[in-house]
Image (cartoon, rainbow, N blue to C red):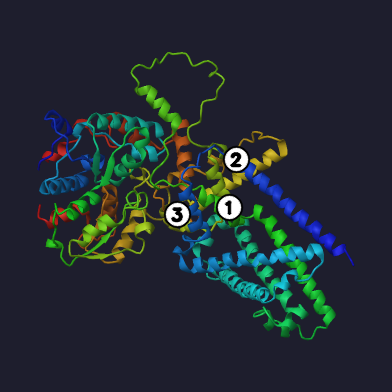
Amino acid sequence: MNYIDNIVFAILLIIGVGFFARNVKKLIRNIKLGKQLDRSDNSTARWKNMAMIALGQSKMVKRPIAGALHIIVYVGFIIINIEVIEIIIDGLFGTHRVLSFLGGFYSFLIASFEILALLVLVSVIVFWIRRMVLKIPRFWNKEMKGFPKNDALYILYFEMVLMSLFLIMNATDVPFQQADAGNPISQFLVPLFENFNAGTLFYIERTAWWLHIAGILVFLNYLYYSKHLHILLAFPNTYFANLNPKGKLNNLEAVTNEVKMMLDPNADPFAAAPEGSEEEIPEKFGASDVADLNWVQLMNAYTCTECGRCTSACPANITGKELSPRAIMMKTRDRLEEVGENINKNGEFKYDGKQLLNDFITPEEIWACTSCNACVEECPINIDPLSIIIDLRRYLVMEQSAASQELNMMMMNIENNGAPWQYNQMDRLNWKDE
Amino acid sequence: MNVPTMAEMAAQGKQPEVLFWVGCAGSFDDRAKKITKAFVKILNKANVEFAVLGTEESCSGDPAKRAGNEFLFQMQAMTNIEVLNAYEVKKIVTACPHCFNTLKNEYPQLGGNYEVVHHTELLKSLIDDGRLTIEGGQFKGKKITFHDPCYLGRANDVYEAPRALIQKLDVELVEMKRCKTNGLCCGAGGAQMFKEPEKGTKDINVERTEEAIDVKPDIIATGCPFCNTMMTDGVKAKNKETDVEVLDIAELIANAKDL
C-alpha cells in the first residue's frame, strides 16, 4: 500500500482547517472589539428569526428571481457538502467511495448531488450574466469597483469550477459509470471522454477529485478575506438582530444620567466627583471609530455580502446622493480589518491617526440619510446600516458640535421654544381659533 | 369646534378618553393645521372625549434625536413625560407619525408609558365600533393612492388602517410600485425636513411624486404632515397642482362627511 496520498491528504486537511480556525479566532476577536450589547433576551423570537430568515431565506425571495437562484445555490451548497464527508474518509483511509455500501440510498444521494450540481452551475452562470451582461445597477455602484467587484466574480468562478470538477470526477469514474446508478447528469459527460484509455481516465478522475477537495479547502480559507462570510455569519447575525420596531432608536444611558441630573432640583452642581472617578474616562457620545460601535454592528459589517439591495432601495442613493448603506457596511469592515491588522502587528491597538468617521465614512454620506429604514427592511439577513449612521451623527453633533447651521437652528428652536421652527410656545393652540 | 385642554379638563376633575398630541407641524404649519382641524371635527362628530395639551405641549424631540442630538431629545422627552404623567395620561393619539413613533417606542424607557395610536388607527377603531360612519360622498369613484409614511409603515408596521379608511370612501385605491414595506421615503425623515438635501441628482420628493403621478391618481393621500409638505411640493414641481391633490386621510374623511 502506498500511504503517501493519505499523508498528503491529511496534511492538506490540517493546513486548510487550521488556517481557517486561525482566521475565525481573529474574526471573533475583531468583533469583540465592539462595545457590549445584551441580545440574550427573547430567545424564542430569535431562534424563529434565524429559522425563517437565515435557514428559510424568507427575505431573499422578496426579489423572486435572485431569491430562487440563491435558494438553489444555497440548498446545493449544503446538500452537496455531504459528499465532502465521503471525500474526507476516502482521502484519509485510502478507500474509494466508502459510502457506496449504502447501495440504492447511495445512488439516490449521488444522483441528487449531481442534479443539484448542475442546477447550481446554471444558477451561478445566470448570476454571472446578471452581473456582467445585464449589468444590474446595484452591482455597479461606485463602491463596487476593484476588489469588491472581482471578489464577487472569483466566488462565482470558484463555484463553477467546483461543480464542474464534481461532475467530471463522476463522469471519469469508470466503475461508477459502469454501475450506472446515481449518474443522471454525469452519464451525459461520459462521451466527452470516450477516446481516453483507462489509465488517462483514472488520472483525470484522481485530478478532479484532488482539485475538488483542494478547491473546497481554498474556498473555506478565502471566506475570511471575501464578502462571502455570510454563509456562516447569516445565522448568528439573524439571531442577534434587533427585535424592536424599526423606528425605535436606543436611548443613550450616559445621556439619560446627565439629563436626570440636570432636571433634579436637588442636584449639587458643585459636588465633588465620587472617589476614584477622576481616573475614569467619561463615555464618548456616539461613535467615531469601530470600537465605539457595538459588537452586533461589527458582526453586521462582516456579514454583509454586498448584494446591494439596501443601496438600491435607499432614497438618498436613488437620487444621486453620496450615501450608500452598503458602502457604510463595507467601510466599517475595512476599518475594522485595518484595526485588526494593527493589533496583529503591535500586540495591541497602536494609534494610527485614523478613524472610521472622516477617513472612511464622510459626514456628507451620513447627513444624506432620511432614517427611512428602507435599507434595514431590504437586507435579506437583517443588517442595520441605519444604527451606524445614527451613532456617527451622535458623535458629530454631541462631541464635535458639527451639525450644519440649518440643523443647529432647528435644535436651538426646540431648546428655546419647544418647536423646530421659531414660533412662540404660547401660540401652540392658536389654530383652534383661526 | 370644541377643543378642550388637559388643564381645563383637570380643573373640572375630568379625564378624557384620549389625549390628542397635536405636534409642532400640526400646531404651527399652515398646511398641517388644516389636518389638525379636520381631525378635531371628526372627533367632535364621533363624540370622542379628547383634550390637547395646548401651550403645555412641546416638541417630542424626534428631529433632534434623528439629527444625533440625543441630549436635546432626552431633555424634551423627560419634560414632556413630566407633564403627561402629571395629567395621568393613559392613551395618546397623534396625526404625526414622527411623534407617534417617538412617544410609542422611545418614551417608555424614560418613564413615559402610554397607549399610543396614530390617528388613522383611532379613526378605524371608531368606525369598527360604530361610533363613526362614512360614505363615499364627494370622493365616490375617484382614484386615490396612499403614500406610506416611513415612521408609520416600516417603522411601526401600520399599513392597513389608512388603507381600510380609504376603501370606506367608495374610491379606487391604487398602489404605487413601491408601497407598504417597500414604500419610498418622501425625503423629510431623519431631520432632512429642516435642512437642504445633500448634493445629488434629484430631490427625493420629486422622485416619489413622479411615482405617484405614474398611477394617475386624483388624490395622493398621506398620514403625515411632513410627507404632505413634501408631496405637495413635488406635485408643484411637476406642475400637476390642477390634476392631483395631496390630502391627509383625516381630511378625506372630514370632507366626505362635509364637516
Residue B208 is situated, as x and y percent measured from the top left of the image, at: 34, 58
Task: State the residue at coordinates (36%, 45%).
Answer: B192
Between A176 and B106, the one lying in front of the other is A176
In this view, which residue lies farthest toward the right?
A: A1
Residue B227 percent location from the top left of the image: 29, 51
Is B173 situated left or right of B258 in this image?
Answer: right
Quarter of the view holding residue B90: top left
| Mark 3 chain | A
Query: Relative to B187, is A251 above or below?
Result: above
Q: Are marks 2 and 3 on the same chain?
A: yes
Q: Which of the two discs, 2 and 1, labels the residue nearer the N terminus? A: 2
The kind of residue tagged 3 is: Asn
Q: CA distance from mark 2 to mark 3?
A: 31 Å
Please name the amino acid that badge 2 sits on: Lys
Residue topped by disc 1: A233
Where disc 2 sits, the SS reads loop
- Judging from the image, mark 2 belongs to the subunit labelled A
Disc 3 is placed on an element classified as helix
Looking at the image, residue B169 sits to the left or right of residue A305; the answer is: left
Q: Is residue B92 above or below residue A216?
A: above
Residue identified by numbered label 2: A32
Pointer 3 residue: A317
Using the rendered image of the protein, determine whether residue B183 is visible from the camera's viewpoint.
no
Q: Nearer the viewer, residue A21 or A282?
A: A21
Mark with earlier residue (2, 3): 2
Secondary structure under tag 1 reads helix
